[in-house]
Amino acid sequence: MLKVKLLILLVVITSFVSAKEYNVSVNGNNKNDGSASKPFQTINFAAQLAQPGDVITVHSGAYREWINPARGGESDSKRIVYRAATGEKVEIKGSEVLSGWKKEKDGVWKVTVPNSFFGGYNSCKDLVFGDWCDNFGKNHTADVFLNGRSLYEMEKMEKVLIPVPYANCKDQEGSTYTWYCESDDKNTSIWANFHKSDPNKELVEISTRRTCFYPDKPGINYLTIQGFHVSQAATQWAAPTAEQIGMISTHWNKGWIIENNIISNSKCSGITLGKERSTGHNVWSANPSLDGSIHYIEVVFRTLRNGWSKENIGSHIIRNNEIFNCEQTGICGSMGAAFSIVENNHIYNIHQKNQFGGAEIGGIKFHAAIDAIIEKNRIHDNLGFGCWFDWMTQGTRITKNLFYNNAWNDLFFEVNHGPFLVDNNILLSPIAIGTQSEGGAFVHNLIAGQICTWPGSNRFTPYHLPHSTEVAGLCTIVSGDDRYYNNVFLGMGTEANTMDHYNYGLVGYNDAKLLVYKAGNVYYDRALPSKDEKNFIQNSNFKPEFKVVEVGNNVFLTYSSDLKGVYLKTSLITTELLGKAKMANEAYENPDGTPLKIDTDYFGKKRSESNPSAGPFENPGKGLIKLKVW
């Protein structure tokens, strides 16, 4: 026994001694040895040397490079760590400084650069493009920045010379800072309206790299990316049928940790957990004669043949990041997000410029979020969906998140068969939930806005064996088979547009084809129960107030409750009560297959076993309630 312990100790010591720390500094030199006193100059140089267990520590400064790791770690305990030095601001930028501007007229300047300025990729020649993208031939992947602020690209020179506010964006004044480009075989010319700013005295940058951190080959596992400011990459549209490359991107691999970063100003996506290219790349655009859903089904089966399984793909952790000003998604992933945890991220101002559109836009947009956990995120002020869960959302739990001021829905579920669980969330946007799915369980949520229940879809979409990527079958969405327990519906806002299936409360389920299970819900103001609901409280005369107040990085919620709610009899929500989703025949349970019970609230406070409070807060008080929710 003693010999075994000594052997284990020797292995641990050997591993510790063999691990290296490489230092990187903007003032370093790649001919150095990477020590603290003789650091390298570029992160990517260190990335070619790092072995499992090594740490790359990057010191303050701006690094304009693409980090393309040569290898990954071996396990969760023997990973390769990329980290910003403690207390130092380390920027990784997908842009280059653009200087030498010449004045054309008041406010308008021009610069011409050789195409070699862009290296091997001219972002002023590459239009935003991909399956389900609506760009209308206007926007390139390039962006121009004035002191870190993104300008608006125009398709005509006249709109630079005489700019007018862009009606569909959030920043009307900012939208008059415009630019336009032309490229030939040798040069690229850029015109920009900087108004009163002199671009030769300010910092002007243009995004030139497709990504900031992305291995160009799949299978680079177990990396940690920690503490960086990542921005300004010329990322391309990330369709689920394409290779998905954001500013920080996994590449068909397993076990990354992306944490404590500030991620902003991506042309399309901030973080991608997507698939790789060999299984298909914008296949619908290449062959529009087939329906897009058929193409995606084919992609799913190709990914299965390419190793899509829990053993090989996913299980990433995305936590404690601030993500904003990305024009397609904050985080997205097609199949590569399976078995992952996304927690405690602050995601906002996604799609704020609204210059192009499409069916892949949101704070988080996942396809096949199998056994994923989306927890304790703050997602707000997005000109798209807060979270969009599309196809194969199964075993997924969305819990204890804060949503508000999202333009479309806080949560949208498209053609999933479940089971998926939505519990203890605060949903405060005008449209809280949109669903064209079945097999969802909505439990202990505070829901201010409308619920949109779309009728069944004729698209055949996959469902899986429990806790697996293996496809069990394909089926259309019939509609129904959802559960709503112990929610509070505030019913606040304008009259619901019932012609488009929008309602306050659950009346949209009156025509559901499959059984919908409901109990313990509270309905105020315009919110109405469904026709066959029992055991609920309704007070249409009560007009609750609610207000969200941001103070620094804190968020306070004030809302009023009716005393009638305290007389409602509820049950503790458990796997046994929720049962199984009909089509997948899978229970609402933990990813490891163990039973679950919703015995804590939004704050982690213990719930009553016999009569838990409706809504996300256990015993929040009576009357006007004020809570710090972030």
Image (cartoon, rainbow, N blue to C red):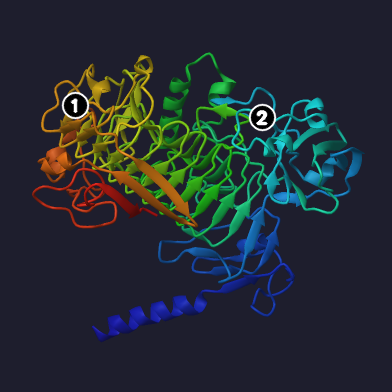
Give the camera-side residue of 362 and 590. 362
* 455 to the left or right of 609: right
Give the camera-side residue of 508 and 74. 508
Q: Residue at x 38, y 49 (%)?
A: 340
Q: Is residue 230 above or below residue 499?
A: below
Q: Residue at x 32, y 52 (%)?
A: 626
- CA separation, marks 1 and 2? 44 Å
Q: Which mark is residue 166?
A: 2
Label 1 crowd bin: few (<14), some (14–19), many (20+), radius 10 Å? many
* 588 to the left or right of 50: left
Residue 215: tell me if it is visible: no
Q: Which mark is residue 292?
A: none
The quarter holding residue 23 reads bottom right
For label 1, the SS is loop
Q: Position of residue 158 (x, y in %)?
A: 81, 26
Q: Which residue is mark 1?
A: 516
Q: Is residue 611 above or below residue 411?
A: below
Q: Is residue 4 above or below residue 574?
A: below
Q: Residue at x 25, y 50 (%)?
A: 617
Label 2 crowd bin: few (<14), some (14–19), many (20+), radius 10 Å? some
- Residue at the far bottom: name it: 2
Residue 109: tell me if it is visible: yes
In which quadrant is the N terminus drawn? bottom left
Residues at discs 1 and 2 in contact (Cβ within 8 Å): no
Does label 1 or label 2 sit earlier along the sequence?
2
In which quadrant is the C terminus drawn? bottom left
For label 2, the SS is loop
Q: Position of residue 316 (x, y in %)?
A: 42, 52
Give the residue type that dot 1 points to.
Val
Q: Position of residue 554 (x, y in %)?
A: 44, 56
Give the camera-side residue of 110 and 389. 110
Give the residue type that dot 2 points to.
Tyr
